[in-house]
Structures are given as C-alpha cells and as structure tokens.
Image (tube, grey):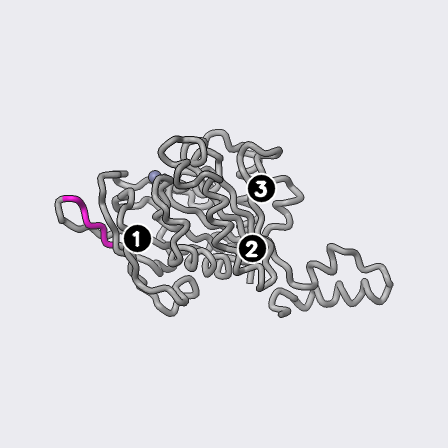
C-alpha cells in the first residue's frame, strides 16, 4: 500500500533511480514506512504497585497494542527516559511521525531542549503527539497546549467509568463501542486545556457512593499544523493499556494524528 507516498517523495525516488543512487532511507521513505515512538519514563515497572501490571513498563504495553499497525507500513519503536538522549535522539525524532507519551513522576527531568524540538516538530506538521493520563502535566503536552493543563481533582477511590463513543464517525472511534473500565483514577473536570476541536470520547464516572460525574476521555486539537490527542484513562496500577478497546483507540489515534 502506498498510502504514505506523497507526490514529492515519488519525485525524489524517481530522481534517485534515474541517477542510479537511490539511498536506502529514500527507498524506505518512498515505500511509505512511517514510525510511531512510544515513550515512557520508566517508573511504572519499578514501583511495587504498578510493576505487577506493567513489568516491562507502559511503553511496552502500548507498543504491543500497536503491532497491527506494522502490517500497514508502520514501524513501532519504544523509548524511555533513562536511555541516551532521554530516549529520543535528533535522528529518531526527525524520522518520527507520531510520538506517544506517558509520564507521571519524572516530568521535571525531561530536558527543555527536547521539549522544544518536539513542540516544533508537531507545530510544523511533521509529527502528531498523543498524550495519555498523567501526561497532562508532561512538559511537551503543556508546551503544545499553552495552558495549565490541570484537572480539578485526582481521586483513586474505586471509581469506575463508562467510556462513551460520542462521535462514532470520528476516525479515532472506528470499530470502538462504549466500554467500561472497572476501576479508574478519577480526573475531575474542568480540564484546563484549550477548547478541543472534537471530543470523540466522553466518560461517566460512577463513584463508590453511587453518584456519577461526566468527564472528557478523548480530546483532539490541531496545534500549528500538527495533531494532538489526549486520552484520559491509563493510571499505572490499572490494566487499561492491555484492553482491546483501548488498544483500538490508540491504533486509530496514531492514524489520525499522523501527518496527512
Ligand atoms: Zn494516575
């Protein structure tokens, strides 16, 4: 499938072949291969309460869920804070089409220089960004949003949630039906972010006392020329990233966020 082959890439490839010097990277680009990088901070696999759920960290669980994309020409790459260049070298970043981010306790360790490069690449329309759960306070997400990005409250008290497909025709909702998360850390509205262009997923929390409360669960923005998606669930002690509905949402979100 040549979905990712733009006219410009085709022309570049043609020129290379004519000269007999088509490089391997040019051929890969021309073949339509695209790269999604799943980044996490390397704490979920260390803390005793979460490492039983995510022994190989959250980036592994999300990346595993994205494997169906490899049959569509996507390369799925994992990155972590503790690696050289905080997991994202210039070379990697410059060949990444979608960056997925999970962080919680080490937001402050992420270098501003890297944050600036991520922000610039998204705004230039070269890469989409997907943030999830406690990434609301991650530096790249805050930089893209330009607002405090705080929720009213954060409560882990045994609340459950019904995740509702509000925009069935939205690409992120393709093949997704309403589903239930038996436990969720409750992030209470308002969520101080810019008005999203769409909210394909909403949620109804049911608290232990039986009362309910609404919150946005999937929000979409266009920032500069790039696309940004935020998914509210994903607390490190719950198995959300192994759930088929969540995995489908992430697969869809990569396709939506990728430069078109
Ligand atoms: Zn959490």
The span picked out in magenta is 204-208
Residue 14 placement: quadrant: bottom right
- Image quadrant holding the C terminus, namely bottom right
* Magenta-span inclusion, residue 206: yes
- 241 versus 22 height, above or below: above
Task: Say which element carries label 2.
Answer: loop
Disc 1 crowd, CA 10 A, few/some/many (<14, 14-19, 20+): many
Q: Nearer the viewer, mark 1 or mark 3?
A: 1
- 194 versus 252 height, above or below: above
Q: Nearer the viewer, mark 2 or mark 1?
A: 1
Disc 2 crowd, CA 10 A, few/some/many (<14, 14-19, 20+): some
Rounded to the nearest angstrom, the CA distance separating label 2 from label 1 is 25 Å
Tell me if 19 is positioned left or right of 245 in this view.
Answer: right
Q: Of 61 and 28, which appears nearest the observer?
A: 61
Residue at 50%, 55% in the rendered image: 66
Residue bearing the label numbered 3: 117
Q: Main secondary structure of the magenta part?
A: strand
Coordinates of residue 234 in the picture (x, y in percent): 37, 45
- 94 versus 104 height, above or below: below
Residue bearing the label numbered 2: 125
Circle nearer the N terminus (2, 3): 3
Residue 216: image tag: 1
Residue 39: image tag: none
Coordinates of residue 164 in the picture (x, y in percent): 29, 60
Circle nearer the N terminus (2, 1): 2
Rounded to the nearest angstrom, the CA distance separating label 2 from label 3 is 13 Å
Coordinates of residue 237 in the picture (x, y in percent): 35, 39
Rounded to the nearest angstrom, the CA distance separating label 1 from label 3 is 28 Å
Task: Say which element carries label 1.
Answer: strand
Q: Are marks 2 and 1 in contact (CB under 8 Å)?
A: no
Residue at 34%, 65% in the rendered image: 167
């Amino acid at each position: 499938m040549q979905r990712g082959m733009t006219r410009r890439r085709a022309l570049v490839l043609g020129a290379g072949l004519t000269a007999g010097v088509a490089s391997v990277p040019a051929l890969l680009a021309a073949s339509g291969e695209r790269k999604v990088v799943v980044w996490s901070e390397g704490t979920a696999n260390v803390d005793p309460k979460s490492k039983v759920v995510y022994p190989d960290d959250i980036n592994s669980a999300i990346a595993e869920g994205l494997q169906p994309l490899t049959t569509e020409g996507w390369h799925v790459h994992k990155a972590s804070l503790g690696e050289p260049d905080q997991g994202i070298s210039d070379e990697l970043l410059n060949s990444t089409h979608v960056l997925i981010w999970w962080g919680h306790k080490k937001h402050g360790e992420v270098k501003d220089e890297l944050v600036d490069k991520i922000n610039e690449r998204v705004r230039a329309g070269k890469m989409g960004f997907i943030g999830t759960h406690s990434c609301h306070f991650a530096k790249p997400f805050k930089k893209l949003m330009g607002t405090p990005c705080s929720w009213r409250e954060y409560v882990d008290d045994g609340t459950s949630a019904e995740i509702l497909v509000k925009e069935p025709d939205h690409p992120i909702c393709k093949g997704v039906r309403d589903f239930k998360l038996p436990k969720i850390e409750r992030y209470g509205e308002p969520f101080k972010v810019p008005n999203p262009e769409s909210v394909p997923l909403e949620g109804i929390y049911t608290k232990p006392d039986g009362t309910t409360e609404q919150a946005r669960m999937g929000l979409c923005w266009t920032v500069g020329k790039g696309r940004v998606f935020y998914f509210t669930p994903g607390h490190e002690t719950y198995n959300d990233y192994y759930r088929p509905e969540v995995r489908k949402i992430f697969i869809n979100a990569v396709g939506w966020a990728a430069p078109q």
